[in-house]
Amino acid sequence: MCKLFSIVRCFTIINKITSNNLYRSIHSFRTMERTETLSGRLSPLVRPTHYNLFLRPDLNSGLFQGTVKIDITTKEEKNYINLHTKFLNITSVKVLKNNVDIPVSKYIEIKQAEQLSINFDKTLETGIYNIEIDFNGDLTHSFVGFYLSKLKDNRTMVASKFEPTYARQAFPCFDEPDFKATYDISLVKPLSYVALSNMNAISSKVEDDRQFEIVTFATSVPMSTYLACFVICDFDFKQNEINSNGIGKNFILRSFSQKHQMHKIDFAQDIGKRATEFYIKYYEVPFPLPKLDMIAIPDYVSGATEHWGLITYRETSFLVDETTASSRNKINVANTVAHELAHMWFGNLVTMKWWDDLWLNEGFASYMQVKALNAIEPSWTMMDQFLIKTMHSVLVTDAKLSSHSIVQSVATPDEITAIFDSISYNKGASVLRMLEGFIGEENFRLGVSDYLKKYKYSNTITKDLLASLEPYFKKEYPNLSIFYIMDTWTRQMGYPLLTLSKGDQPNQYVVTQKRFLLDPEVTSTNDTDYKYRWFVPITYTSSNGTNRNIIWFPDTAENVVVTVGEAESWIKINNKQIGYYRVNYPLEMWQKLIEQLKAKSEQLTISDRSHLLDDAFALAEARVIPYDVALSLSSYLRVEEDYVPWETAARIFLSLSDKLTNSLSDNLNIYVQQLVKPLYEKQIWQKTNLGVIEGLLRTRILSLATRCQLPDAQAKVRTMFLNWLNSHGTENVLTIETDLRDFVYYYGMQSATQQEWEKLWNIYLEEEDAQEQTKLRHALAAPRDTTILRKYLTLAWDEKNIRSQDYLTVVGYISGNPSGTALVWDDVRTRWTELVGRFSLNSRYLGNLIPTVTSSFNTQLKLKEMEVFFDQYPEAGAGAASRRRALETVKNNIKWTDHNQASVLDFLKNHQQI
C-alpha cells in the first residue's frame, strides 16, 4: 500500500478517536456561520468552466484521495469564494490567477450549508481564476457520493451516485445543476480492473509499482455535477453499434455486469439499442457523446441514475435471466432502461436551472419511456399500461392536502431529495401526456425537438419548454395561451372533478368543476393564483363514437355546455383518460355506462374501462357517489378479458381489503371470486409460450384468484410451492414457471411452518440472481406466524443477509402482512435512531417507510401513536412530506370506516351471487 493511504488511514483513525468527526482538516478547517450562505445556494456570479479531477480510491482500505483543479470565472468582487463540500477532508487549497498564487488566508467548512469557504486578505477582482484542492475521504459511509460496493465473493468495486446533491461528497465542486462545466477525469485502478467514466478513455499509464494504472478520459461536454460518474470494477461487457440513421455519428453502446452474469444483460442491451435509436429519430438531435455505457451495480440506492454516457443501475433494474425473470420483471427493466436513456437528451443535454423544475427531467423521461416502448414493442400496449403504472396511483396522492405542486420551491438538500416523488415523476408525465393530447403528437414532437436544439448544453425553466411548444399550439388554438393553461396544472397541487348534469335541452350536458379531495370534510384554502380551478381540455365518447375535438373549460368559467347528437343515449368524458381529472355523472348515466360495459361495447377502449373503474371507486371513497354504484360497475368484470382493467380492479380490491377487518374481507373475497372465476377457468398453470401482455393477464388472474381464496387456486398454489420447495436441491427439482413464481412463492408461504421458512431462507442465502432474490425476499414475509416474521425482521438488519439497499423494502413487505404490521411499527419506533444512523434523514426511502408501514392504520389509537412518535423525533429531513401524507392517510382511513364500511358490507352481503 502506498504511503499516502497509510497517512490517510492514520488521520482518519485519529479523528474518529478524538472527535468521532471525519470532517476536520489538519488546517484551520472549522465551522463558520455566514448568514448569506446558510441556504446552501452558491453565488451565480462565480461560475466554474472546467474541472480537472484526479481520484485514487483504495479498494482495500475503503479510503480515497483526490485532487481537483477548477477553472472559474467571477463577476463579483469579494474576499471569499464558496463551493460545495461534504464528508471530505480538505488538506490543501491554492488559488491562482494567470499562474500566480493568490494568498489564501484560510479555508473554512460551513457545515450547515455543506460549503467550503476560501477566504482572502483582500478583495478579488473579477476575472478568471484556478482553484486547486487536495482532499481525501471515506468510501464506506454510505451508498451515495463516491462509495465502495462489496461483491458476494469478498471482491470490491467503487462507483458514484451524485443525483441530486451528492457530487460534493466525492470532490469539492459547484454542486448545482446550473453550473455546467467540462471535465477532465483521471482514475487510478488496479491493473486487472476497468475504469469507466462519462467519456471514452484516451490514455493509460502503469505506475512504477506495476500494481496500479492511471486512466485518463477525454474532455467531457459541458454538464452539471450530478451527471459526472466514475466506476472501477472487474466486470465484463457486451456491445452493439447504435445506428444514428444519419443524425450524427454511429457509436457504441456497451452493457457491463459481473462476469458470471454476462448472460443476463442481453435483454437490457437489446432494449437499450432500440430505444436509443428511437430517441435519436424522435428528437432529431444527435447523441452528443462518443460512447454510451450501462452498468449493473450490486449496491445501488436507487433503481438507476442517468449519469451522462455511463448509466448506473441496480441489478434488479437491469439484469434479466430468461430462466428466472417474469414478464413483469422484463417490463420493469425495459421501463427503467428507456427512462434513463430518455434523459441523455431531456435532462442531460438540456437541464433544469434549479431543482424546483425537476419535473422537466423526471416527468418527461417518465412519459418518454412509455412512448419509446410503445413504439419498439407495440404488443405490450404501453399507452394503456400508462394508467396502471403511472397515473392512477398519483391521482390518489394528489387528492390530498399533503400533496404539492409540480413546480415547487426547494432550497435544502432534504427538500431537493424529497421532491423526487410521484408528483415530479407520475403527475409530471400525466400532465405532459395531456398536453400532447391537445397539441397533437407530431406538434408535440416538433416542439420538443426545437427545445433540445435551442437549449443544448444549457439550463432551462418550465417556461422555456412551453415557449418551444407554443408555435405549434397556436396553429390549433390561436386565441389561447399555452403558458396560462399549463400554469393551472403545474403551479397548483391537485386536480379537478368535472361533474355532468342535464342541460336545458335533451342533448345538452352542463359541466362544472371543483377541486377533488378524497376527504370531503377538509377545508381547502384558495391559496393559489388560480383558486384551485383549471383550464381543462374536455374530450368525450358517446354512443355515436369518439368526438376528437377539444372542448375547453377555462378556469374562470362557471361551466361549459357539451352538446351531443339527439340520438346519443350515453356519454363518457375524457377519452382514454388522457386528461388529468376525474368525472362524475348523473346516476342514470352511470347506469347506462355500466350497461355498456356489461355489453362489451366496442366504443369503450381498454383505457376507458380502466378509467371508469378507477374514477368510480375514487368518487365512492370521497362520498361523491354511493359505493353501490362503484361496486355495481365492478360486476361487469365477469366479461372483462383484458389485462389493464383487471390490474386496475385488483388494486381497487386490494385497497378495499386493507380497509376492511378480516371478517369483512371474507365477504369481499366471495364477491371477487365470482367476478374472477369465468376468466380464471380459461387459464392454464403449466408452462406456455404466451406474449408479454397475455402473460401479465394470466398472472394477474391467477394471483387475484389465489388472494381472494378461490379454493381451487389456493390448493394449486400450495401444492406447486411445496413440490418445488421439497424438491429444491435435488436432481428432480420441480420448477415453477417464471411468470408465476412471485405469487406462488408468496401465497405458498402464507401457511408455512418454521421448518419451511428456514428452508426458503437458506435457498435465498444461496441464490445469486437478483430478480429471483426479490421474489424470495417477498415470500419470506408472507407467513401469518408472528414468530417467523419477528425472526425475519431481526435477520434482515444484518447486512450479511440483506443488503442495505433492500432492507427498507423488506420492512415494507413485512408490514404489508397484516400479521406483521404492528410488529414492524413497534420495531421502527424502537430502532428509529439506528435507522437514521444507517440511512440518514436525507434518505427519501427512509422517509417513505413511515407512510408504507402506517398505510392500513384506521383507529384513533394508532393515529395518536404516530403523533407521539413524530413529537419524539421532530427532525424528519427528506421525510417531512411523507409524515404529513401518512397522517392524512390514517385520518382518511378512520373516516372511511365510519362513513363507508357499512354500505360496502351491505352490498357485498346482498351480492353473494351475481
Image: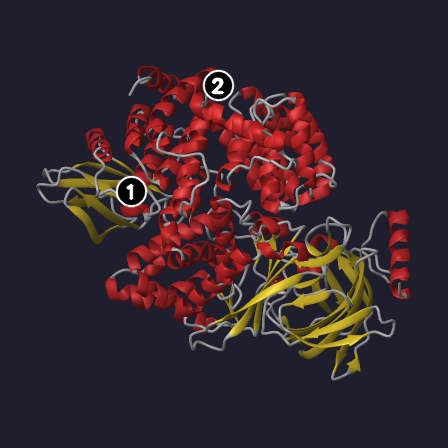
Instruction: Identify which residue, 404 or 216, lies in the foreground.
Output: 216
Secondary-structure class at tag 2: loop
Residue at left offset 67%, top offset 23%: 754
Q: Residue furthest bottom?
A: 98
Few, some or many residues within 10 Å of mark 1 (<14, 14–19, 20+): many
Residue 853 seen in this snapshot: yes
Q: Quadrant of residue 50?
A: bottom right
Would you place residue 808 above or below residue 184 in this image?
above
Q: Which residue is mark 2?
A: 661
Mark 2 touching mark 1, by CB under 8 A? no
User: Which quadrant does the N terminus fall into?
Assistant: bottom right
Q: Residue at x 43, y 48 (%)?
A: 427
**Would you name the residue on which mark 1 appears?**
608
**Residue 454 placement (x, y as % from top left):** 44, 73
The residue at 61%/71% (across/down) is 45
Query: In the figure, is residue 274 to the left or right of 615?
Result: right
Compute the Cα span from label 2 to label 1: 32 Å
Amino acid type shown at disc 2: Thr
**Callout 1 amino acid:** Asp
